[in-house]
């Protein structure tokens, strides 16, 4: 690289990912974090220019760019799985937190969305439980949308790409006087998907999304700010590219779709008096979604799963921070939330499923009079009410001695979760006589009526400590840091397992199997970790080279895993592994040159293995934790040049490569996705407020899989997206 062109002077080097950014004066982001977090965390920051250069509109597009951060593209937008440093699960509670304009998104099912006009993204790796509470043991994602105090003007975007993919957005940002600013944004995106269903030649992965955002900021003085962000989003998806391994085809007969409506409103108030800053964050969140799945994903009529849900959440956070002197800083905070979900999740068996999953099992012993179900459609009804709530108190103290800073943090978390269930099935069967020339009914219809209802609840309490030590290197070359932290992820209930419990009750009625213990099958325990980490942030060669490196070791107890229990037909269960260990390293580097060329590299390595885990039939000790990639890689070259004459005012180009793998798909490590790499490229030209960008993704059309599962003894893989070529037009008119 040094042979290409001369290095840029320090003052000309732009701040990019994994750097400390200078934020606008009106920023309200430093409510809990601050400069100390820059020195004691593995953190990646991306500014608006970097986000637009890489065409990032959702978290899945950040995957691999951040070392050891992986959010795969599979299933519906409800499936928002995030894996960080060997931690993560497919369903239920996340391992990372997500804040949008300071508002914590409580439900992981809301993580996967497209967002226009992102001002910056901050991804902190490692436990953030002290300041941000439950379900942040893997890290925290902060997304900040564009503020009218950062940009004032009009932003328009129009994009079209292969597979009938499009995006369109319109943003208006205006300061109204009196310290008031307002931002309005409307956004739409859609695609027909990359594949087709061979059964009916329909599009697979078709999607449409619409969203709107209204942000209001009031800053009457330098010491006081109020900001409110209200957002509305609607998503509709049809079909998923699940390819059956045995046939190599995507082919299923029943409808698959996911529809979601979300509404959020978050209010942030921040005031400063002397050395003390007091902040408050309150939010309302609502989700209404509807999912239907061809659960067997074959052309046969086995069964379908439907889930309809509506949920609301209230959150409140109060934070006080200040300093007593130049050598001591402190923070106190309290947080609380209330959450209530209503869910209908019936499973419906059809003729083929009734024959092969119920009748064949019942008649396997070869009875004189085999049974036959009278109804050829068998619904298993499941209804749930899931209320939960919790609160916490937390504190951090920072002591400074010269270039050393020590931080001690402590948080107490309390949470109560509950499930109220009502499950039922009403059907009948008859015994048939096949001895004669014509089969005849031997008995009248025998009713099979199953009703079960009840209430389960749990209370969790955790005390979470943290200790960090950092050292500032001479001449502002960077810092060194070390930390010890306890992480925590809450427990819960497996709603999908109730259909299996209901099936067992039906089978018991016909004299087949014993019943499941409901509490044992549907409850899962909290997950906890102890995290040990050392790292450095280095600014070398006159700040031309930005280098960040981290080494971590994680001891995990009761790690939550998504599994298929023995004998299950429809249910995925969250189970707890006894003990596991994850260790690894991360490195990010960026070097800038005075000719507008910049090189960027990030790499993450994770070795996550079970120490103590058995499902009762197999011992998985020593095996890799599934779904967590062993390696993430990002390498890119970018070029940016401004012209003083000619039609083109500015030109930029980017080429990059993303790598991921190896990923094991099961606890036995019998199936895996090898390491693969995807190359992207783009060229963008500006003329005044107009710009046009030509881009290509997966240039080599690499074939890869993002998900693996087994249903009715059939194995399936989800296809990754192939080659795509697109054109993006932008109009950014900034007012004086």
Image: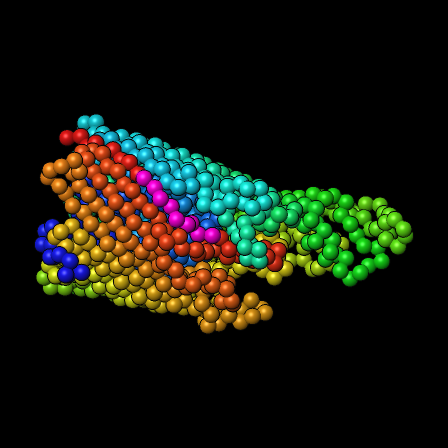
Residue 184 percent location from the top left of the image: 30, 31
81, above or below 174, in the image: below
Foreground of the two, 77 or 97:
77
- Can you see residue 216? no
The residue that appears at 44% across and 52% down in the rendered structure is: 720
In the picture, measured across the screen, residue 264 lies left or right of residue 692, that is right
Residue 180 percent location from the top left of the image: 22, 30
64, above or below 189, in the image: below
In the picture, measured across the screen, residue 355 lies left or right of residue 286, that is right
Q: Quadrant of residue 530?
A: bottom left
Foreground of the two, 454 or 379:
379
Residue farthest along the right direction in this orientation? 436
Foreground of the two, 117 or 190:
190
The quadrant of the image that shows the C terminus is top left
Q: How many marks?
A: 0
Span shown in magenta: 719-727
Residue 627 percent location from the top left of the image: 45, 60
The residue that appears at 23% across and 59% down in the rendered structure is: 589
Specify whether residue 722 is painted magenta: yes
Residue 499 percent location from the top left of the image: 62, 50
The residue that appears at 35% across and 51% down in the rendered structure is: 699
Specify whether residue 512 is painted magenta: no
Q: Quadrant of residue 714?
A: bottom right
The quadrant of the image that shows the N terminus is bottom left
How is colour applied across the structure in the image?
Answer: rainbow
- Can you see residue 551? yes
The residue that appears at 21% across and 27% down in the rendered structure is: 176
């Amino acid at each position: 690289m040094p042979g290409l062109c001369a290095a840029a002077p320090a003052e000309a080097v732009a701040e990019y990912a994994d750097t400390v950014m200078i934020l606008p004066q009106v920023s309200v982001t430093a409510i809990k974090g601050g400069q100390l977090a820059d020195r004691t965390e593995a953190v990646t920051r991306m500014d608006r220019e970097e986000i637009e250069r890489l065409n990032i509109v959702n978290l899945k597009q950040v995957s691999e760019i951040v070392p050891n951060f992986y959010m795969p593209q599979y299933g519906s937008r409800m499936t928002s799985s995030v894996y960080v440093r060997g931690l993560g699960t497919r369903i239920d509670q996340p391992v990372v937190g997500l804040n949008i304009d300071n508002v914590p998104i409580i439900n992981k099912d809301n993580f996967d969305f497209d967002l226009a006009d992102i001002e910056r993204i901050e991804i902190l790796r490692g436990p953030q439980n002290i300041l941000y509470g439950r379900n942040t043991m893997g890290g925290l994602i902060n997304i900040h949308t564009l503020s009218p105090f950062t940009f004032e003007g009009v932003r328009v975007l129009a994009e079209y790409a292969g597979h009938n993919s499009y995006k369109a957005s319109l943003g208006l940002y205006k300061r109204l006087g009196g310290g008031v600013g307002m931002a309005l944004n409307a956004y739409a995106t859609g695609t027909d998907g990359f594949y087709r269903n061979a059964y009916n030649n329909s599009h697979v992965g078709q999607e449409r999304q619409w969203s709107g955002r209204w942000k209001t900021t009031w800053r009457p003085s330098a010491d006081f700010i109020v900001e409110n962000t209200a957002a509305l989003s609607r998503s509709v998806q049809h079909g998923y590219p699940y390819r059956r391994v045995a046939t190599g085809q995507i082919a299923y007969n029943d409808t698959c779709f996911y529809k979601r409506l979300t509404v959020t409103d978050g209010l942030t108030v921040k005031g400063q008096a002397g050395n003390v800053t007091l902040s408050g964050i309150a939010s309302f969140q609502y989700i209404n979604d509807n999912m239907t799945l061809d659960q067997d994903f074959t052309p046969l009529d086995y069964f379908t799963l439907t889930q309809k849900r509506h949920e609301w959440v209230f959150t409140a956070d109060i934070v006080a921070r200040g300093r007593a002197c130049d050598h001591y800083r402190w923070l106190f905070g309290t947080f609380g939330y209330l959450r209530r979900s209503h869910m209908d999740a019936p499973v419906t068996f059809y003729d083929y499923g009734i024959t092969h999953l119920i009748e064949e099992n019942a008649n396997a012993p070869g009875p004189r009079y085999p049974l036959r179900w009278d109804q050829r459609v068998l619904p298993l009804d499941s209804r749930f009410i899931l209320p939960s709530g919790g609160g916490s108190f937390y504190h951090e103290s920072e002591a400074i001695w010269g270039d050393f800073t020590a931080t001690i943090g402590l948080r107490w978390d309390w949470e109560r979760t509950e499930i109220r269930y009502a499950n039922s099935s009403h059907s009948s069967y008859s015994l048939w006589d096949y001895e004669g020339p014509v089969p005849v009914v031997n008995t009248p219809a025998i009713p099979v009526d199953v009703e079960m209802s009840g209430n389960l609840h749990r209370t969790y309490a955790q005390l979470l400590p943290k200790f960090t030590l950092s050292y500032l290197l001479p001449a502002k070359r960077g810092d060194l840091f070390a930390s010890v932290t306890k992480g925590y992820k809450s427990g819960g209930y497996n709603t999908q397992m109730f259909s299996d419990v209901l099936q067992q009750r039906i089978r018991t009625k016909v004299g087949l199997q014993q019943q499941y213990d409901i509490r044992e099958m549907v409850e899962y325990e909290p997950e906890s970790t102890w995290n040990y980490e050392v790292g450095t942030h280095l600014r070398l060669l006159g700040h031309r080279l930005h280098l960040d490196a981290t080494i971590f070791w994680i001891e995990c107890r009761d790690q939550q895993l998504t599994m298929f229990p023995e004998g299950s037909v429809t249910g995925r269960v969250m189970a707890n592994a006894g003990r596991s260990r994850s260790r690894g390293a991360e490195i990010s580097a960026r070097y800038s040159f005075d000719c507008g060329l910049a090189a960027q590299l990030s790499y993450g390595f994770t070795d996550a293995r079970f120490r103590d885990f058995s499902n009762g039939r197999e011992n998985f000790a020593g095996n890799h934790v599934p779904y967590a990639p062993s390696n993430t890689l990002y390498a890119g070259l970018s070029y940016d040049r401004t012209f003083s004459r000619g039609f083109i005012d500015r030109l930029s180009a980017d080429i990059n490569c993303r790598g991921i793998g190896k990923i094991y798909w099961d606890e036995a490590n019998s199936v895996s996705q090898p390491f693969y790499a995807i190359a992207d490229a783009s060229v963008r030209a500006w003329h005044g407020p107009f710009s046009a960008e030509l881009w290509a993704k997966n240039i080599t059309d690499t074939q890869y899989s993002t998900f693996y599962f087994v249903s009715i003894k059939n194995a399936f893989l989800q296809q990754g997206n192939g080659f795509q070529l697109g054109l993006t037009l932008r109009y950014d008119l900034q007012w004086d």
